[in-house]
Amino acid sequence: MNPEGLEVTLEKRVLSIYGRVEEDDPEGYSQAYREYAVGDFERQFTLSGDFDIHRIEANLKYGVLHLATPRAPEAEAKRIQVRSVS
């Protein structure tokens, strides 16, 4: 798997991962066992809680995708000034 073969999207609260597994047998070799088949795959997750959409990261290392969805900071208390309207 390489980064060009992956697409990660977030729409509303649904995180979608789409990828394509390519044939990667070295020339002259044949596989005895394969964990995943060649072809497309897609997974969807519904996220709960508040998260910071601008800090979401996706990293791929040694074929393992690591997604970080940091929580959004909690809103701080704010004093609202009350004005008299005539």
Image (cartoon, grey):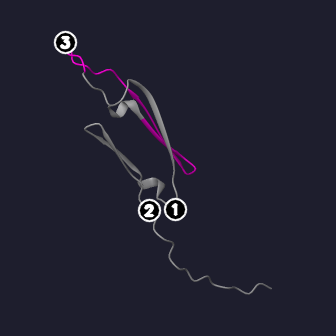
Labels 2, 3: front one: 3
Q: Please state if 61 lies on the left or on the right of 19 as rendered.
A: left
Q: Are marks 1 and 3 in contact (CB under 8 Å)?
A: no
Instruction: Say which label, 1 or 3, has the lower sequence index.
Output: 3
The residue at which mark 1 appears reads as 49
- At horizontal 28% and vertical 22% (from top left) the residue drawn is 24
* Residue 38: % across, % down: 38, 23
The mark found on residue 28 in the picture is 3
* Direction top: furthest residue: 28
| Three-letter code, disc 1 | Gly
Identify the secondary structure beneath mark 2: loop
* Residue 6: % across, % down: 40, 34
- At horizontal 25% and vertical 19% (from top left) the residue drawn is 25
Dot 3, how many residues are within 10 Å of its Cα: few (below 14), some (14-19), or many (20+)? few
- Dividing the picture into quadrants, the one containing residue 71 is bottom left
The residue at which mark 2 appears reads as 71
Identify the secondary structure beneath mark 3: loop
* Residue 17: % across, % down: 45, 39
Identify the secondary structure beneath mark 1: loop
Answer above or below: position of 36 versus 69.
above
Does the stretch in magenta take in 25? yes
User: Which stretch did the figure color magenta?
Assistant: 7-31
